[in-house]
Each structure stands twice: as structure tokens, then as C-alpha cells.
């Protein structure tokens, strides 16, 4: 008899927690943004022109890791880590070919670069697709640069 009572009590507790979890899930769903709220355009953030970049030696491993994560989220669809071009040019050797300031400005203020920089305009003619503004902050761009340096073999 006590086995049945224990089983019945366990069932009641399970039913109670299941209902509580369902209620919590429904409340969370009500608080989350709707599809129309998510579709509201976000303002583009344009950086100001970067005039200097301080490089470290050795690389900052935390920045490399964060830069890799940002790359995987915002850059991977268009840029390979090799010299292979997808939509945009591959990143292999980019830190050897370009100055850090140039790279940082391409990441944070691509519109300015495509309007004023001859090398950026030449790349646009080759790739035929304008790089979109990814709303990357200067701090995150610096971490992407650190990841690029790591990709190019710097330690």
C-alpha cells in the first residue's frame, strides 16, 4: 500500500512541476520579441576613421579566440582563411599585404573605404560584391585583426 502511495505522490509532484514548467515557458514566450519586432531595421553603425593601431608581440590569445568567434559569426560566409576567394577575398596573407590601419578601416568603416581608397575600390571591381557593413566595433575589429595575424602564422 505504501508503494502505491509513494507512486501516487511522485505522480502528483511530477504533474505539478510539469504544469509549472509549461506556465513558465508560456510566460517566457509572451515576453520574447515577435517576428515583426525582430524585423525592425537596426541602425547601421559606422566607425570613425582609424589612424593608428598598436600591435602586440606576442599575440593576445584571448583576442585571437574572440576574433575567431567573430569571424565565424560575421565573416566566414564570404571569406575563407586560405587564399581562395568566395564572395570576398581569402584572408591568407592579408596582414602581410595590408597595413593594420587599412584592415581595421575595412572592417569598421567599409563605406568610407570603398568611396575613398583606391585599393578597396580595386577589390570591389574584382569581387563584384560590395562588402556589407557588419556593425563591428573598433574593439572587435582589433580582435579580428589579431585572429588574422594568427592565421598568417604570427605567434
Image (cartoon, helix red, strand yellow):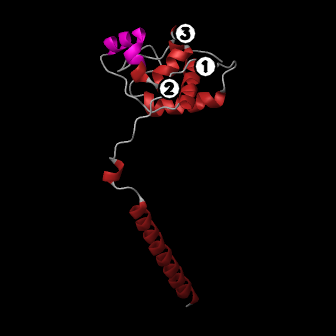
Mark 3 or mark 2, which is nearer the start of the sequence? 2
Mark 3, residues whose alpha carbon is within 10 Å: few (<14), some, or many (≥20)?
few
Mark on residue 96? 3
Mark on residue 48? 2
* Relative image position of residue 102 (x, y in whole percent): 50, 15
Cα distance between the residues tagged 2 and 3: 24 Å
- Quarter of the image that includes the C terminus: top right
* Relative image position of residue 152 (x, y in whole percent): 56, 15
**Numbered disc in front, either 1 or 3:** 1
Mark on residue 53? 1
Q: Residue at x 42, y 20 (%)?
A: 112
Helix or strand or loop: what does disc 1 sit on?
loop
Cα distance between the residues tagged 1 and 2: 13 Å
- Determine if residue 120 is in view: yes
In the image, taking residue 35 as reference, residue 82 lies left or right, namely right
Q: Magenta stretch containing residue 125, yes or no?
A: yes
| Whether residue 66 is situated above or below residue 55 in the rendered picture | below
Q: Residue at x 34, y 15 (%)?
A: 124
In the image, taking residue 68 as reference, residue 125 lies left or right, namely left
**Numbered disc in front, either 1 or 2:** 2
**Numbered disc in front, either 2 or 3:** 2
Q: Which picture quadrant has residue 43? A: top left
Mark 3 or mark 1, which is nearer the start of the sequence? 1
Mark 2 or mark 1, which is nearer the start of the sequence? 2
Magenta-drawn segment: 113-127
Cα distance between the residues tagged 1 and 3: 15 Å
Between 101 and 152, the one lying in front of the other is 101
Helix or strand or loop: what does disc 2 sit on?
loop
Q: Magenta stretch containing residue 137, yes or no?
A: no
Q: Residue at x 57, y 33 (%)?
A: 66
Amino acid at each position: 500500500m505504501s508503494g502505491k502511495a509513494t507512486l501516487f505522490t511522485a505522480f502528483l509532484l511530477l504533474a505539478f512541476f510539469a504544469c509549472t514548467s509549461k506556465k513558465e515557458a508560456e510566460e517566457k514566450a509572451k515576453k520574447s520579441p515577435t517576428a515583426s519586432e525582430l524585423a525592425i531595421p537596426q541602425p547601421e553603425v559606422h566607425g570613425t576613421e582609424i589612424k593608428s593601431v598598436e600591435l602586440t608581440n606576442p599575440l593576445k590569445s584571448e583576442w585571437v579566440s574572440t576574433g575567431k568567434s567573430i569571424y565565424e559569426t560575421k565573416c566566414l560566409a564570404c571569406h575563407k582563411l586560405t587564399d581562395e576567394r568566395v564572395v570576398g577575398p581569402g584572408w591568407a596573407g592579408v596582414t602581410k599585404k595590408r597595413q593594420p590601419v587599412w584592415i581595421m578601416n575595412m572592417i569598421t568603416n567599409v563605406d568610407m573605404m570603398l568611396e575613398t581608397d583606391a585599393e578597396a575600390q580595386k577589390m570591389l571591381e574584382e569581387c563584384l560584391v560590395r562588402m556589407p557593413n557588419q556593425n563591428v566595433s573598433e574593439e572587435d575589429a582589433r580582435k579580428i585583426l589579431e585572429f588574422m595575424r594568427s592565421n598568417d602564422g604570427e605567434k
